[in-house]
Amino acid sequence: MEKRRILLVEDDANFREVFAHALGEALAPERPDVAFVEAESLANARARLREGGLDAALIDVTMPDGNGLDPHLASEGWGTPLLGRHRGTPLRLDK
């Protein structure tokens, strides 16, 4: 099975680390082959999305350099499912 690549967009480095670890632990029983690609800013996220090869993106909506709800962000992903969270509410950002 091919490794799945998930972009994790979050400006808080500690949260990125804890979230990636927690999600990895939660998925451990199923043993998916997942790698997290990290982005600490929306500018960095756009660059990663343009590079391609991502299966999904989890995006912090409130970022220092912009809003994760920006509709232009979805166009950078070229079909990559974009998921966000705002005040505990999950959001599908690419629809």
Image: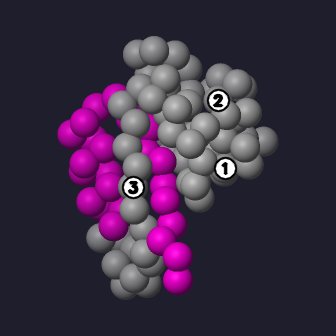
Residue bearing the label numbered 1 = 80
46 inside magenta stretch: no
Residue located at (32% from left, 51% from top): 19
Q: Which residues are magenta?
A: 1-24
Residue located at (36% from left, 31% from top): 40
Residue bearing the label numbered 2 = 73
13 inside magenta stretch: yes
Q: Identify the secondary structure beneath mark 3.
A: strand
Q: Identify the secondary structure beneath mark 1.
A: loop
Q: Residues within 10 Å of mark 2 (few under 14, many from 20)?
A: many
Q: Nearer the viewer, residue 59 or 1?
A: 1
One can see residue 93 in this view: no
Q: Relative to 86, is 40 on the left or the right?
A: left
Q: Residues within 10 Å of mark 1 (few under 14, many from 20)?
A: some
- Tags 1 and 2 touching, CB below 8 Å: no
| Residue type, mark 3 in image | Phe
| Residue type, mark 1 in image | Thr
Q: Relative to 3, is 91 on the left or the right?
A: right
Residue bearing the label numbered 3 = 36
Q: Nearer the viewer, residue 78 or 90?
A: 78
